[in-house]
Structure formats: C-alpha cells, structure tokens
Image (cartoon, grey):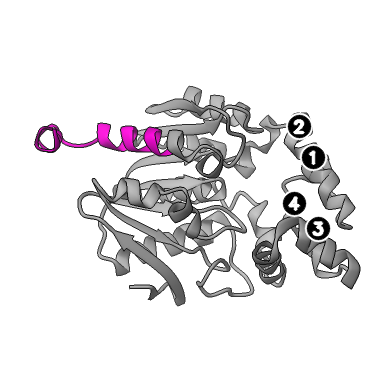
Amino acid sequence: MPRMKANGLNFHVQQSGDGPDVVLIHGLTGDLSIWFLARTLATLAESFRVTAYDLRGHGYSDAPETGYTSLDHAGDLLAVLDELDVRKARLVGHSFGAVIAMHAAVLAPERVEALVLSDPYFPSLRHLEDLSRWGHWQNFRKEAEDAGVSLSADTWYDLTNFFDQVLHLDDQKLLAFRQAVGLPGLNRVLRLAKTTCGRDSKLDGGLSAEMIDEVSVPCLALYGEYSPFLSTADYLVQHLPRCEGRRIPDAQHRAPEENPRAFNAEVLAFLESLQPAERQKVRS
C-alpha cells in the first residue's frame, strides 16, 4: 500500500505490525523516513499496527499549491484513516506533526485514543516561547547566513521568508545552502517553497489555546532535554486534564533523531500503558 488516494490527493503510506492502531506523523520539511531511520516504526510494530505517511507536500505524497494549515493536514489524516478503515488510533506526532495530531483530536475526538506530542510548538501558544535563548538557533542562524539566508529570531516561526530567500538564491549561494543542508533537504525546501506551506504553517488554523486545553484523551508531552519549546511542554502538562510530561536526555528539538533509543522507549512505554489489562497479561 505504498500510495493511496485520500481527501483528493495521493499519499505515500507505509504500514507494519498488528494490534491497536498507531499513526506516526512527521514534521514540516521532513518525511516518513524519520520513523524508519529512528527505528520507531519497527519498535512499535512489535505490539501495534503502525501506519506512517508523508504529509501533503512532503516525501512521495502530492504537493498541492495551497492547503497547509494544521486544519488542512488534520483533514488529510482523518481521510487517510477512513481509507484504511481505522476507526480509532493513537497518534504520535513530531513537531508540526504533533500540532496536526492535536487538531485531529479536536475535530474528531471519537477517532483519537491517545496522543504522543513530540516537541511541538503551537501557533496559538507562540507567545510562550523565545527562540533567541536557544543556542542551537544561533548556530543554525549563522550557518544559514553563511549560505545567504537571513533569519530573524523575532520571526523564527515564519517559513515564508525562509522559503522565498532559498528560492531566489544565486547559483553560488544555492550551492553553499545545498552543502549545508544536503541535496535531499534542498529539494524538500524548493518543493515546499512553491506552495503556501510557509504562510499556512504559522496560522493557528482555528486551533485555539482554549481548544487545546479541552483535549481530554491521554497525552504524553515528550520534549528534548534542551528543547527550545519547554515552556510549551510545561503548559501542556499544566492545562491538559490527562497529560504527563517526559524529557528525552541529550536531545534538543529532534529527539527521534538525536536520541532514538530513549525516544522509542518512552513512546512504547506510554502506548503500552494504555493496553487493556488482559492484552498486557498475554504479552507478559
């Protein structure tokens, strides 16, 4: 089932394992390969039926010109679940993928059994964060500037300016940028730069703080020890009625890549804790 039609688009989908349904949702400018490289899919597939898919505009899925808010992506997710005949799932989202998972839980709470929120920030909670305090941001900003792309700590959330600059780099600066991010990374950015992804991803898409606070399914707020978004992590634990928080040691924003062993262990433990008692006994 490498490709399937849902919500009027073709999506690249991979599925493995057997058991309760878990869906893995990657972040912006990424693709589902993160779950293979981190061995998250393989680890979870020992206990669950695991589905991973490329978001619209990413990987091998279609890239329409418009429609990249978390609301649009959540609609895609629910349509993918419909096509797979998955009535209820546990959602594991990283970065913007976690925002999509949260939005899906708001739109269709009966379809979402639990959420693993890996290092998201939410547009409606942007005021909580100050990325300029994050040392990794300063390093990335310098690398980008050396490649001809100017970034501002005041508008770190705005991909529109970033995409537009990359799209208009001259040959020499484009080569420098390619050397900094790699050819696959460059191709992903150039593809998204031709869409409204940059503009849309900074909008809350109707996912207000009040709506986030009302999500009552079990949640795990899973953030890197040195994440730039720890204020959001604290907010989720304090405001969501059934949210627990965990920190991944030696990780910043990309815990699935930076410490996959610890990341996978936390996700598996949380998802297993939701298993019916009789299934846990069988597995033990």
Label 2 to label 1: alpha-carbon separation: 7 Å
Eye-nearest disc, 3 or 2: 2
Q: Which residue is mark 2?
A: 135
Give the label on residue 158, or none: 4
Position above or below: 18 against 226: below
Is 201 positioned to the left or the right of 81 in the image? right
Eye-nearest disc, 4 or 2: 2
Is 144 positioned to the left or the right of 159 in the image? right
The structure residue drawn at horizontal position 58% and vertical position 29%, both measured from the top left corner, is 250
CB under 8 Å between discs 4 and 2? no
Residue 284 visible, this angle? yes
Q: Secondary structure at mark 3?
A: helix
Q: Which residue is mark 3?
A: 161
Please state the total of marks drawn on the protein image: 4
Give the label on residue 139, or none: 1
Residue stretch in magenta: 264-284
CB under 8 Å between discs 2 and 1? yes
Is 186 positioned to the left or the right of 99 in the image? right
Label 1 to label 4: alpha-carbon separation: 18 Å
Instruction: Residue type at mark 2: give it.
Output: Gly
Residue 131: where, in percent of width, then height?
Answer: 74, 35
Q: Quadrant of the C terminus?
A: top left
Instruction: Residue type at mark 4: give it.
Output: Asp
The structure residue drawn at horizontal position 43% and vertical position 55%, both measured from the top left corner, is 36
Comes first in the chain, label 1 or label 4: 1
Label 4 to label 3: alpha-carbon separation: 6 Å
Instruction: Residue type at mark 1: give it.
Output: Asn
Label 4, residues with CA under 10 Å away: few <14, some 14-19, many ≥20:
some
